[in-house]
Image (spheres, rainbow, N blue to C red):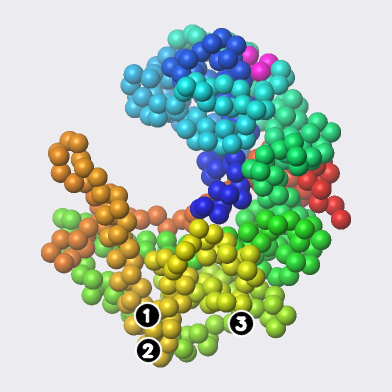
Amino acid sequence: MRAVDRLVPGVSTVTRYIRYHSMYAAIAAHAQQNGLDAAACRRLVRRGEVLLAALQQHRADTDATWSAHGIDRVRRFCAAELELARAADEEQPNQSYSPRRWGFWDQYGGPATVLGTVAVREGALRPGRHACPAGVTGLFAPLLSLASRDVVSFAALEAAGQAALGIPCPAEQEWLTQVLTATGAGGAHVPEEWEASDRTRRATLRILARAIELHGHEGDGYQETLRSAVAFGEEMTTDPVLAAIPETAGWRGTLLRHYSVGAWRRLWAALVSGIGSKDGEADRSAEELRDWLARQSPDGTVRGMLGDLPPLRTATGRLMPVERDLLAQGGDAPMTNVRLLVVGALRSREGQLTDEVRAVFLGRQRRSAEFLDPTWIDGLIHDHTDRPVRDLAARLVDDMLAQSRRVALAKLRTDPATGGLKIFSRLHLRNERYFKTGDEGDSDIGTRIPQLGALAEQLGLFAVQDGCHTVTESGRRILETGR
């Protein structure tokens, strides 16, 4: 997650729409012009978000690909007219469109301040280093003019329809294209005019664009397309565009480590799913949990399992897509995830990856082996080489349980309601038996690449044709991928 944060600044896994960035920038400009304090800004943000969702709900021609944030909860306030005050109620937020005090600005605020479209001063929204242009403030002026009303008629709402999601706005597209790609009005990139985070984001966009040009025809999503160009094969070093971008090595290390992180999450979720609740009869001892994974292990030793793995790279140093192939063959089977962890451990060894890739793969802030990281697994492989695979599997269960305990203790807090200690964990131990209060998620940690691709698509840099991703002419020109 640290690597992703460094490589995709200004984008998060929950920032889906360019239009919201524009709205918050327009609100910041309005707030400065009218001297709004933090409380007034919060009120305007909440009402603006409700109005945008209500506009999407009211439009009969709404494209199903667009879904305004909070639209499901806003629907109940749209009967004969929009009950704006009730929908955006700050006094009873749980009864409103969003229980969060700042609504969906909580999702966009961090990225917006990194992008420089909004600044926060004394809690109030103000224009960032990239001031909102007149064309964008004009786009939202009719919508924000309705924010002072407690009830809004649909006729008045319709008059603000230009701000709806999916309605093109050339001024918005031009401005946010410049911001996202770190380019000037003529589409040229002058590094000295931009901050380090802007240059890094541009580099990632260029890498993704080049990956689309090389592999977009394969019909995969943005993330898998990036993997095809960067994680495996030779194009990272042989393609003139990719080889010239320093961040390419960082993406190889990040995407390869992503397989190990995902394997741990799926393995842990599968283990917890078989444990019962506090009041049930399916609580489990540590021995029973060790047996759960050990029984699924193949016969033979760890050395034999290593011998059954395909080569991780060719004699010329080309990385083979072993992780991708394992997932294609075994899906979410627990031993598939064990093998993915083993592959990650083998890749962590000296000489398997270049120094720059290996530094990101293991973590730039890493000072020594960390719990459950690839070098930790490599140590277990060394200790279990001539022992049965089931012994390694049992040890992995012990390590997961121990790490769960460490994480729970690190989050230990005093409960102000009771004065006792509160443990934030779904897995608990009672009388040497484990029970759960809920299941664990098994989804992959977000790389933000799908979101970055979607934002670039909204700006006209990328396009989808016949189910395949392409880079538009303006995208090639702005991102300088044509060679």
For disc 2, the marked residue is: 387
Callout 1–callout 2 Cβ contact below 8 Å:
yes
Query: Percent from the top left, x then y, of residue 439?
Result: 32, 55
Within 10 Å of disc 2 (Cα), the crowding (few <14, some 14-19, many 20+) is: some
Q: Residue at x 42, y 87 (%)?
A: 385
Q: Is residue 143 visible?
A: no
Residue type at mark 2: give it.
Arg
Q: Residue at x 71, y 38 (%)?
A: 194
Within 10 Å of disc 1 (Cα), the crowding (few <14, some 14-19, many 20+) is: many
Instruction: Spot the residue most to the right.
Output: 483
Question: Mark number for residue 392?
Answer: 1
Q: Is residue 327 visible?
A: yes
The magenta segment is 137-141
Q: Nearer the viewer, residue 84 or 158?
A: 84
Question: Mark number for residue 311?
Answer: 3
Q: Residue at x 35, y 82 (%)?
A: 390
Residue type at mark 3: give it.
Pro
Query: Percent from the top left, x then y, of residue 249?
Result: 66, 61
Instruction: Specify the principal SS of the magenta part.
Output: helix
Which element type, helix, strand or loop, lies under badge 1?
A: helix
Callout 2–callout 3 Cβ contact below 8 Å:
no
Q: Earlier in the sequence, mark 1 or mark 3?
A: 3
Q: Nearer the viewer, residue 23 or 271?
A: 23
Query: Percent from the top left, x then y, of residue 143?
Result: 59, 16
